[in-house]
Image (tube, rainbow, N blue to C red):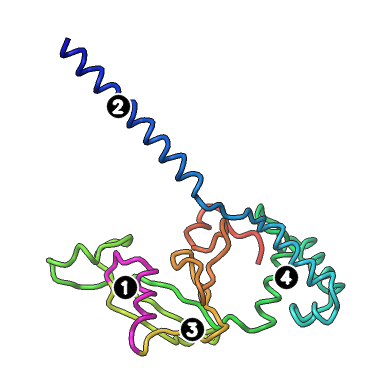
Amino acid sequence: MKKKTKAAILALVASVLLVGVALVRKLRRRRLPRAPYVNHAAEREHYINSILRGSERLCVSQIRMKPIAFHHLCNILTEGEHVRPTIHMSVQEQVLIFLRIIGHNDCVGAIDGIHVRASVPPEIQGRFRGRKDGTTQNVLAAISFDLKFTYVLTGWEGNAHDSRVLNDAFTRLGGFSIPEGKYYLGDAGYGNKNGILPPYRSVRYHLKEFSDRLPKNE
């Protein structure tokens, strides 16, 4: 009798606990703030239309040409297969972004990390072994469009991520800095942040990505 009573009590306690957990989860779901749905594709299309279908003065101030010249340029690039639409972006949007960038001189250069051979003591070689063969150091370099190095940071271990090296460059006294309103081109390893513009998704840019599929246009 005692065993049956004990089992019944345990079953009752378990049921109460399950009900309590269910109530807590329900309350949490109710309190969870829901962010509004944002249709980014529609927002981009609205922005493009505001430039191309607005006043000619606005269009010239944004992309340095009138709408009729812009559409003519897009037709030339499309017919010659110099630019193709992607699943994420139309030809018009690609061209507009390009013209917006070069027309306002916001981009001041490019940054990247390169692995340089390093001779280090055996006890710390593990930290200097990364994606490359042997021991290397991850060197951050920034270069301007006139092919001059504007910043170089050496000494980081080969297994250090590019974004970690970049963050260290920002925090160093007299280290790497980006002028207000300007940005550097960087690869996907740096992420999208203020002052750094990585490539669009699904865009090939490493040489190894062209090994079996050669570029088809300029």
The residue range painted magenta reads 157-173
The residue sitting at 34% across, 70% down in the picture is 115
Query: Where residue 174 sits in the image (x, y, percent)?
Result: 36, 90
Question: How far apart are the alpha carbons under marks 3 and 4?
Answer: 24 Å
Q: Is residue 21 in the magenta section?
A: no
Q: Report the residue marked by disc 2.
A: 14
Q: Which residue is mark 4?
A: 96
- State the CA–CA distance, disc 2 to disc 1: 61 Å
Q: Position of residue 136 (x, y in %)?
A: 27, 69
Measuring from the top left, give residue 143's x and y in whole percent: 48, 82
Which residue shows up at 76% across the image and 66% down it? Answer: 77
Residue type beneath disc 1 = Val
- Label 4: how many Cα within 10 Å (few below 14, some 14–19, many 20+): some
SS under mark 1: strand
**Residue depicted at 37% across the width and 86% down the height:** 175
Secondary structure at badge 2 equals: helix
- Going from the N terminus, do you reach mark 3 or mark 4 first? 4
Residue 90 occupies which quadrant of the picture?
bottom right
Answer left or right for 44 relative to 33. right
Q: Amino acid at mark 4?
A: Leu
Which is nearer the N-term, disc 4 or disc 1?
Answer: 4
Specify whether 136 is left or right of 55: left
Q: Amino acid at mark 2?
A: Ala
Which quadrant holds the N terminus? top left
At label 3, counting other C-alpha atoms closer than 10 Å, the crowd grade (few under 14, some 14-19, many 20 or more) is few
- In front of the other: label 3 or label 2? 2
